[in-house]
Amino acid sequence: MTKKCITILGIESSCDDTSAAVIKDAKILSNIVANQEVHQDYGGVVPELASRAHQQNIVPVVNQALKIANISKEQVDAIAFTRGPGLMGSLLVGTSFAKSLALALNVPLIDVNHMEGHIMAHFIDEGQEMPVFPFLCLTVSGGHTQIVHIEEHFKMTVIGETIDDAAGEAFDKSAKILGLQYPGGPLIDKYAKKGNPTAFKFTKPRVKDLEFSFSGLKSNILQLVQREQKKEVDFIKNNLEDLCASIQHTIIEILLEKVGNAVKETGIKRIAIAGGVSANSGLRKALKDREKSHNWKVYIPKFEYCTDNAAMIAIVGYHKFLQNKFTDSSITATARMKLGLH
Ligand code: KG4
Ligand code: ZN
């Protein structure tokens, strides 16, 4: 008898992307993401607007994910959803929807930690080489910057963390100083490609071995820009590419210095990256270069699994399904949620 495949519907709504994905065992059949452009004019995510947009998007996004996967609701074996961390109003939409749908279809419900999803995206089967345990993951997103030590699928420990801003925030806040639209990370990446990464020098933070800090960089950039604008009104416009390249270079140096410290402390040379900032082309290249120069083994996710998506929630759902890690409808969303707690 052939083994039955497991089909999971994943739902993600922790911040400003509404997403649904269907996974069959470890292979993705669909991964639909509805971005919320409404926040661009405000220079950041407006929580109230985000939850309203999730309410509007969730049904069409789920229907589209099922349609692209070419399955009916009745073929879904379980529903996995993001429980936290994230914006409470946004999480509530996905959580309530997942609970209702699981109840209506009479299938099990699986709660997923969003940050674990970012890391586990590496186990989506795209025919690529998957990380071998134990490995370290640099998880860099809009809300988090962590170095995580992963021993098994559900055994992970945060060994390093930011004491103030996240790496994604450092990109977005720097971009805001330069007058770029939210989210500024991808725009800095774009302009940095044509700039000189050593044109401007910024000071590096002085924090403990495995800690990150980005708030000083932000003040440093602001001071430089204000000082230079007094001499040259169009300073930003005339130096945009060099500014972006230098900012990106500094953030990457800070991140990789800490990864280097983590390698020294743990003796583990297998390094993965995850989260929205792992889409950054400079970071991806710098890490690839270290693979050769430092003899590391590096795992870089596909672009579509870097920023928020439901495929990463569905793959966690699949592994939890295999281990019978289900929840029930008394579960509630939680804005703060630690890694590794089940
Ligand atoms: O993981 P994510 O989609 O959402 C959170 O969980 O926060 O990460 C979003 C962050 C934003 O700060 C965004 O500017 C950043 O990831 N980001 C980038 C790039 N693409 C997204 N930062 C630098 N370069 C990129 N190419
Ligand atoms: Zn995220």
Image: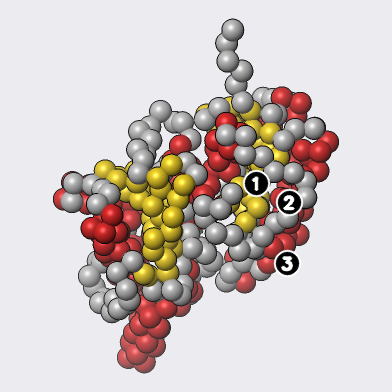
Picture coordinates of residue 184, whole percent (x, y): 48, 65
Residue pointed to by mark 3? 48
Does residue 86 appear to the left or right of 270 in the view shown? Answer: right
Residue 111 numbered mark, or none: 1
SS label for mark 1:
strand
- Residue 35: x and y in percent read 62, 53
Residue 194 lies in what quarter of the image?
bottom left
Image-based side of 253 in relation to 16, left or right? left
Task: Between label 3 and label 1, give the one nearer the viewer.
Answer: 1
What whole-number distance in Å separates the C-alpha atoms at marks 3 and 2?
22 Å
Cβ at disc 1 under 8 Å from ligand 2: no
Residue under numbered circle 2 = 331
Residue at 70 percent across and 29 percent down: it is 76
Q: Earlier in the sequence, mark 3 or mark 2?
A: 3
Residue furthest to the bottom in view is 230
Asked if residue 155 is positioned above or below residue 192 in the image, the reply reads above
Q: Nearer the viewer, residue 160 or 232?
A: 160
Residue type indicated by callout 3: Glu
Q: Residues within 10 Å of mark 3 (few under 14, many from 20)?
A: few
**Which image quadrant for residue 210?**
bottom left
Q: Earlier in the sequence, mark 2 or mark 1?
A: 1
- Quick check: marks 2 and 1 in contact, CB under 8 Å? yes
As helix, strand or loop, the secondary structure at mark 2 comes to loop
Report helix, strand or loop for mark 3: helix
Using residue 81 as the reference point, say whether residue 130 is left or right of it: left
- Crowding around mark 1 (Cα neighbors within 10 Å: few <14, some 14 to 19, many 20+) is many
Instruction: Please say which color scheme the image uses.
Output: secondary structure
CA separation in Å, label 2 and label 1: 8 Å
Alpha carbon separation for disc pair 3 and 1: 23 Å
Q: Nearer the viewer, residue 327 or 186?
A: 327
